[in-house]
Image: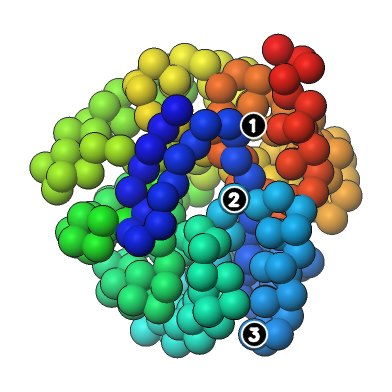
Amino acid sequence: MFKIPAKDLEWQITTPQVMGILNLTPDSFYEASRHSNIDSAIAQAHLFIQEGASIIDIGAQSTRPGAHMEGAEIEIQRLFPYIEAIHQAYPKQLISVDTFYASVAEAALKAGAHIINDISCGGFDENILKVVAKNNAGYIGMYLTGGMDSMHKVEPREDIIATLISYFEAKKKLLSKYGIEHWVIDPGFGFGKTVEENFTIVKKMNELKKGGLPILLGASRKSSLYKTLGIESKDALNATTIVNTVGLLKGAAIVRVHDVKEAAEIIKLLPYLQ
């Protein structure tokens, strides 16, 4: 079991969990995940909860290849009313916010969020770690190379798993300086990696477990899946389910998905497959 801070709520991971993706951006790569008004977002949050989501992950900045970086102020303007509304409607529901800006994290936690999901693991704005520690918030840190404009560039590596282990060991030391000992690692499926590296992460997820921290797998409908099959993201639910099943069997603690119902069904069946 993992017990992770989550501001004023308890976040215990005793069995695998599902994180449902709720996007507030007009250009996220999967169109069906986008929401442009509060009523639609609350309805989606309600559906996610009914289908079995432990966490709702709200994002206001697309990080797909070629996405324009809007900046912290626009993120805050987009996020604040939605977080407040969802938190008011479901005060006991864990809400995470997908951001790498300290100012956005501060505003999001004030509005009712509990977890910060940072793709840069403190690399873009280290002050975000101060915000997390001060608020006793949950934290998810992802493996990422490059900057905001080069995060999808593939860097040469001999062994992606060894690279991930080394990266997260260094990040554990960094976060520890801020008093953050219990958090979630995300190997960054789809960010600056070859297709082979992405699938290796899933196949060898159990090797990352040796670090002693829970692992999030975020492969939902990503290009390594749909391009390998010669289809589009809208048709990649089955591929997502297959990859999530393998990842969960190999030790993933959380799957971040667009389709909560199907992911929750995998978890219900896991005890019969292990």
Q: Name the residue that disc number 1 marks.
A: 195
Residue 65 higher or lower than 243, as above or below: below
For the N terminus, the image quarter is top left
Please name whichever residue, 233 or 264, is drawn nearer the observer in this view of the structure: 264
Left or right of residue 103: residue 140: right
The answer to the question of whether label 3 and label 2 lie on touching residues, with beta carbons closer than 8 A, is no
Please name whichever residue, 60 or 176, is drawn nearer the observer in this view of the structure: 176
Distance Cα–Cα, label 1 vs label 2: 29 Å
Pointer 2 local density, CA inside 10 Å: few below 14, some 14–19, many at least 20? many
Left or right of residue 217: residue 157: left
**Amino acid marked by disc 1:** Val
Distance Cα–Cα, label 3 vs label 2: 20 Å
Disc 1 on helix, strand or loop? helix
**Amino acid marked by disc 2:** Ser
Say whether disc 3 or disc 2 marks the residue closer to the N-terminus: 3
Q: Name the residue that disc number 3 marks.
A: 38
Left or right of residue 37: residue 94: left
Q: Name the residue that disc number 2 marks.
A: 54
The spot of residue 214 in percent (x, y) is 44, 32
| Residue at x 40%, y 61% (from the top left corner) | 114
| Residue at x 14%, y 48% (from the top left corner) | 178
Say whether disc 1 or disc 2 marks the residue closer to the N-terminus: 2
Q: Name the quadrant containing residue 65.
A: bottom right
Q: Closer to us: mark 1 or mark 2?
A: 2
Residue 222 higher or lower than 44, as above or below: above
